[in-house]
Image (cartoon, helix red, strand yellow):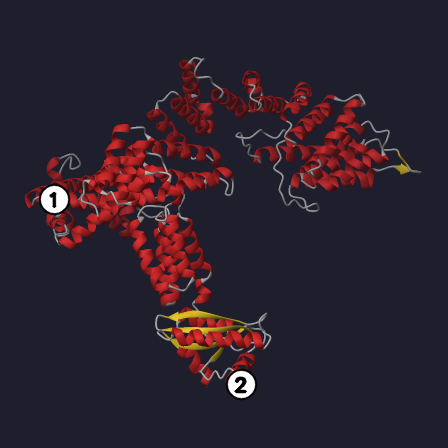
Amino acid sequence: MGTYYNILYNGNLALEAGNEELAQNYTDDYWQILPLERMQVEEKASSSESKNANFQRAEEKATKAIQKHNMRIAGEEHNPQMDEAFLLLGKARYYDQRFFPALEAFNYILTDYPESDRLIAAKVWREKAYMRMGNNELALQNLQKLFEEEVEFEEEDLAHASAAMAQAYLNLEEKEKAIKPLETAIKNTSSKEQKGRYLFIKGQIYDRLGEIDSANKSFDKVIALNRKTPRVYMINAYLQKAKNFDYTQEDHLALRELLEEMQENRENRPFLDKIYYQIAQYYKSTDSIEGSVEYYNKSLRTQSQDSYLLSRDYLTLGNINFDQAQYKIAGAYFDSTLTNLTENTREYRSIKKKRENLDDVILYEDIAKKDDSILHLVKMSSQERLAYFEEVTAKMKQKAIANAEQLNRESENSNPQNLFGSQQSNLSSNSRSSTFYFYNANQVAKGLQKFNRVWGGRELSDNWRYKASSNASRRDDEVKEEEDFLALIESDPAYNPETYLEQVPSDEKVIDSIGKERNFAYYQLGVIYKEKFKEYELASEKLETLLQNNPQERLVLPSKYNLYKIYEATENVAMMEKWKQNILSQHPDSRYASILKNPRSLRDDDSSPEAVYTSVYRKYKNDQFQEVINDTEKYIDVYTGEDIVPKFELLKAFAKGRYEGFDAYKEALNYVALTYPQSEEGKKAEQIIKESLPNLKNETFAENKTDAKYYLVYSFLSGKEKAAAQLQEILDKAIVEKGYENQFYTSIDFYTPQQFFITVHGLSSKLGAEGFAEILAKEKEYKINREYFSISDDNYQIIQVHKNLEAYLAKQSQ
């Protein structure tokens, strides 16, 4: 009796309090099928430490009952409450996320109390523990066996067993099989909260299975429970039904009235974020974009804690602006979307890629807008320009004055004045040390200062608070302050038209440069809108405007060809034919004309970008770095705007590094990374800058190592290629005759435009390299008496990168 009415009673109270705390701290994700049990399981849960004081207390009570109240005599337990104590112990550990110790407690009942009336409960909780440990198949198998035995369940145990089976099916992604046990759990649970939750989950399952009518029936049952279950289930049931609304068959007006009624209900304030979102979805589905934008923004302003809901708001607003070609605004919304999504998910990567595609659009739109405004001012006459800036500065002045007046009004409102001022008496009837106000000099001084600050200088007369004449001094101060402020504005260069007139460029070179920058931005926008976004109307507008603005020659032909492809894609035969004939008549010898005459030639054309790149790359492999630099610069202009350009830029960077050294290499890589950040070449350049350049920056020569590779190097000046070829022939002969053909080999290595090396590879030490050179010098059949030097692989890389051979040789001679 003491065990039941004292220890276990208090333990069960603590367990109940812990469960209530779990429910309060758990946040449901209504975008997913809810778990049947509200418990947030930590991934790295400890099996020994308690996390919740209530569950710790429940465990202590169960342990106390077991240790002090057990009556095991001759191997038989005579206290019938011991199985209840072990069940409480297991539940406390289960809810405290210590599943293995919980399993031990449940198994103890099954093995040591075979006659207990709590065996079924212990089996059910054991399977729940198995499920929490990831053994869903085992738990499901044991539960099915339990039902097949047709044991007599208590209602609570039957509800727990059925719910556990339904959860196991959900964990195994077998949603349809979860419905039957879930219905059993709904029928047998005594908790209205659980009943509402189970009904809502049943609706979610039907919804995922595409059985919308069955889903709505379940949601209707949740709504019918009304206040018998937490309001959150009812509200989400309404919203789920709204998501399932058939706009082609059902009454739009009824849905709108329902949603408006929900937003006006004061009890629904905690759910306004979701209600506003659903109203926005309603307007979006009925093609009222303006209304949907208003409510998506309302949903955002509720400062919702649902990050996925926020991502839906931002994403939809981003897509709306994207569809309206407001790409800069869309980019900002996509940025906010990404901050509310989990990284490395498929949706995150998809939106991130879409956002990255907007970078170039935003960049070139800003350039085009800025340059267009400057060139527009340049075209104005001096009188028109002056009138324009006078109008602009006048508006700026008005705005400054309005802002000042607003700040002044806000200042007055934040310090309201009344007939007796806002100063409260400092007297306290309970303070023995207080004195009369006018006997305290400090109080009087403070009062005078406050009076002057609030009322200004006042004449001593009747009704001084109300007389207009008494405010003369204050009005004079205000007038003077206003005059000073206006004078300050008039003297501020920011409000003087001349300030801006002086900034309008007049130098033809500067104007021409701005025009070229604007034209290139228009070309890039045309290509981006065409290729990335299929916005053919915007693309054609940009390219046709470009052709009317006297563009550089290199932009003319690609622009015409892109216009031809745009009108081909939009099936505008007349415009397509117009640009085709323009290219054939005005540029008959161009690559684009050849393509138009014979489209099949594009694949095998030696002048195609891919074929040209291959030929230039072949020169790079042959150490023809100067030719590579010249060719890449030529073809970058020829193929402006095409995808091949970043490849040429990166190849040019590599060639510059080999030809000119580290500084030129670094500068060229930075250009590629910053100019083409979205291309594979730009990303590769950025990776090299971060990972490889820090190591290449090192100019300090390494000490000779025994395990390093070494080279024997003979240096030649440009123009001595014939002598170098003869030396290489002798070296190759010596390597074969000495039996080193499988170990050594020679190469011709570029160093600078004025110098190159004949290098022997495969040597394993500095002494070995020098010894081989001495043998070649002494033996008559070779007689190689040229100067040479030996160098390790690391140091050879340093002299090739930094072109500092003299420094290396000076160090070796010390």
197 is higher (above) or lower (below) than 591: above
Q: Quadrant of residue 807?
A: bottom left
SS at mark 1 in the image: helix
Q: Give the position of the N terminus as an image quadrant.
A: top right
Residue at left offset 55%, top offset 32%: 28
Give x and y (percent) for residue 149: 81, 23
Three-letter amino acid code at disc 2?
Answer: Glu
- Disc 1 target residue: 379
Q: 644 or 170: nearer the eye?
A: 644
Q: CA distance from mark 1 to mark 2?
A: 81 Å
SS at mark 2 in the image: loop
On the question of residue 2 being in view, the answer is: no
Closer to the chain start, of discs 1 and 2, is: 1
**Looking at this rendering, what residue extends furthest in the front direction?**
781
On the question of residue 323 being in view, the answer is: yes
582 is higher (above) or lower (below) than 250: below
